[in-house]
Image (cartoon, grey):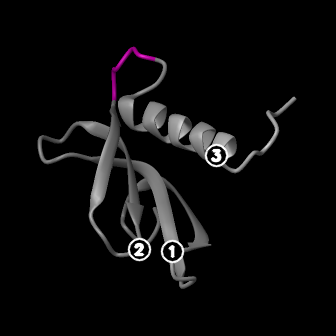
Amino acid sequence: MGTRGWYHERTLTTVDTVGREVQVSTGLTRDPEGRLVAAIAIGDGPTAIFRYAGETEEHTELLANTEQTVQQLRRLANVPPRI
């Protein structure tokens, strides 16, 4: 377990919008009802659930929104498509 007490926690360091280092963690934890969930958290902030155990969809809305945001950034920044 990592610093949040999650299972299989992965943490990386990036920067926020003003250049300060911030930790982003993803991992498995339990929701208030005890269900196993995949979650993400930034710094010491709150945790957001992006998948419940047993969900059958390939992508959750959070993952789909993230992918769409990155695609939009690439278009607006005139970054060529990945090959």
**Mark 1 or mark 2, which is nearer the start of the sequence?**
1
Q: Mark 2 and mark 1: span between their CA atoms?
A: 14 Å
- 56 falls in the magenta region: yes
For label 3, the residue is 76
Dot 2: element: loop
For label 2, the residue is 43
Indicate the position of residue 42 as horizontal and vertical percent values. 41, 66
Residue 33 relative to residue 18: left or right: left
Front label number (3 vs 1) = 3
Indicate the position of residue 83 as horizontal and vertical percent values. 87, 29
Residue 56 relative to residue 31: left or right: right
Front label number (2 vs 1) = 1
Tell me where the magenta segment starts and ends, as one range: 53-57
**Residue at 41% across, 74% down:** 43
For label 1, the residue is 17
Q: Image quadrant of residue 3?
A: bottom left
- 70 falls in the magenta region: no
Secondary structure mostly taken by the magenta-highlighted segment of the chain: loop
Q: Mark 3 and mark 1: span between their CA atoms?
A: 18 Å
Count of number-bearing discs: 3
Above or below, 26 against 75 in this view is: below
Say what amino acid the circle numbered 2 marks: Gly
**Residue at 37% across, 67% down:** 4
Say what amino acid the circle numbered 1 marks: Thr
